[in-house]
Amino acid sequence: MKRVLALLMALVLVLIAFTGCGTTAQTQTSDSESGTKSEVANTTETSKKEEQEIVIYQNKVEIHEQLSAFAAEYEALTGVKVIIKTSGGDSPYAETLKAEFQSDRQPDVFVIEGMGGYKTWESKLAHYENEEWMDLTALEFVVDEKTYGFPVAVEAWGMAYNVEMLEKAGIDPVTLTNQDAYRSAFEKIDSMKEELGIKSVVAMAAGPDMRWVTGLHNFNGYLSAGLEYGDTTVLDMLNSGEADMRRLSEYADWVELLFEYSDRAVLLTGNYDAQVGQFGTKQAAFIHQGNWIDPWMTSNGVDFEMAFAPHASVQGEMNTLFIGAPSYYVMNKDSENQDAVKDFLNYMATSEAGHNYMVNEAKMVPAFTNVTLKPETPLSANVAEWVAKGNAYTWLQNDMADGFGMGTIAPLYESFAKGDIDKGEFINQLAAKIQELKK
């Protein structure tokens, strides 16, 4: 884990170094519309092959158009057709992926997230070996010394905030490191809603379309907030069926605080667009989301300054965000197009066109050390600043039992948000679900 954190820091240092040289993402892309001569040469052999078709089934609705456009460029260059299918956001990816495997055309590439995904799909996975991209990252997904996953991006989440709005309210985001500070800030902003022109302090969603926000991302605060990077103590307890009741109680206080200062309609029934849109249209000062909302902001013309503060998921001082490379492209072992898949992923990781797609189009922070383009979107750029500080909280929600987050505990958040259960019942029911994991 320390190696992973060091790699995250190294990636950011590369970005900072090239920023210092005055090289921006915009100027570099103007010279790479069709790739370099070496890139074209490397794909000539592929273009002579019998026409092939790759199906990629992925879970990021916010990059569907951008990835599809990159796939079209790749087809024009190589003759290999890459079909992008997407399910996510309001649709449960895990369920729709299982349905996809029952269809006549199984995907050649799909996405897993952590050990939970690996255990579910282990029998369908082929491993990568001696691929060019493997020498350019330490964030690949490895099990038993075999590489199964190509890292999609470095991602992070915290409490994103509207910089100008906090300034108007006299709130210094640097002070937002604990629950008491957040409560004071929320109370003050709530008293200024009319002056600030907002409907609620926080854009938060806990309804059936957004179970990944509550049962995965928010619950990850219980698993890793305030702990050293790589500390799996709480996760290990959970997976053995044991709840840390004191920590769970502190965590419930944070959930209650977020719900209390959220817009009821968005909280109970809002989908991804409703939640992100509330923040993007300046109807909320904060949003519980990550840097993956940058493409939505860009495509909808949102240009106000925004940044992240830590989640105060439990008691104590929180000093960083949840940062990692949580999603991986994996190969279907039954695919007849594995060589074509490998070529496509190598092209994404090593070519200027691939770098342009990841940084400038998809607005991501790449997981590869050879990428020199700088994220210009506000939240991804802010993630780079947080990583440069040398600290992070771990993504562990994907290492829970398959379905535990979205299927087992997320409905409890809905009940709590609706008022069907109180905080004490929320805590006890969470603990009961954890105890059911005991083998």
Image (cartoon, helix red, strand yellow):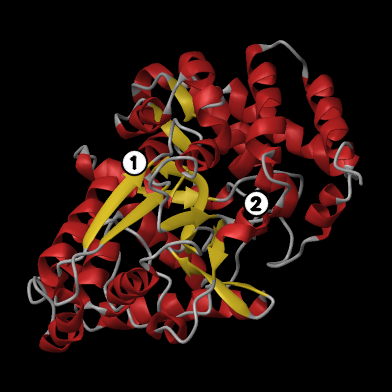
Instruction: Please name the residue shown 35% across and 42% down the image.
Output: 61
Q: Nearer the viewer, residue 400 or 298?
A: 400
| Relative height, residue 187 to residue 176 (above, below) | above
Q: Position of residue 142 (x, y in %)?
A: 61, 73
Q: Where is residue 216 in the image (x, y as percent from the top left)?
A: 62, 42
Q: Is mark 1 on a helix, strand or loop?
A: helix
Q: Position of residue 273 (x, y in %)?
A: 35, 29
* Residue 55 seen in render: yes
Q: Nearer the viewer, residue 165 or 300?
A: 300
What kind of residue is marked 1?
Glu
Q: Nearer the viewer, residue 120 or 326?
A: 120
* Residue 171 seen in render: no
Query: For residue 112, which quarter of the picture?
Result: bottom right
Instruction: Please name the residue shown 35% across and 66% down the image.
Output: 337
Quadrant for the N terminus, please: bottom right
Q: Is mark 2 on a helix, strand or loop?
A: helix
Q: Where is residue 95 in the image (x, y as percent from the top left)?
A: 54, 36
Query: For residue 258, which quarter of the picture?
Result: top right
Question: Around disc 1, counting alpha carbons within 10 Å, would you say few (fewer than 14), some (14 to 19), or many (20 or more)?
Answer: few
What kind of residue is marked 2?
Thr
- The residue pinned by badge 1 equals 164
- The residue pinned by badge 2 equals 120
| Relative height, residue 74 to residue 198 (above, below) | below
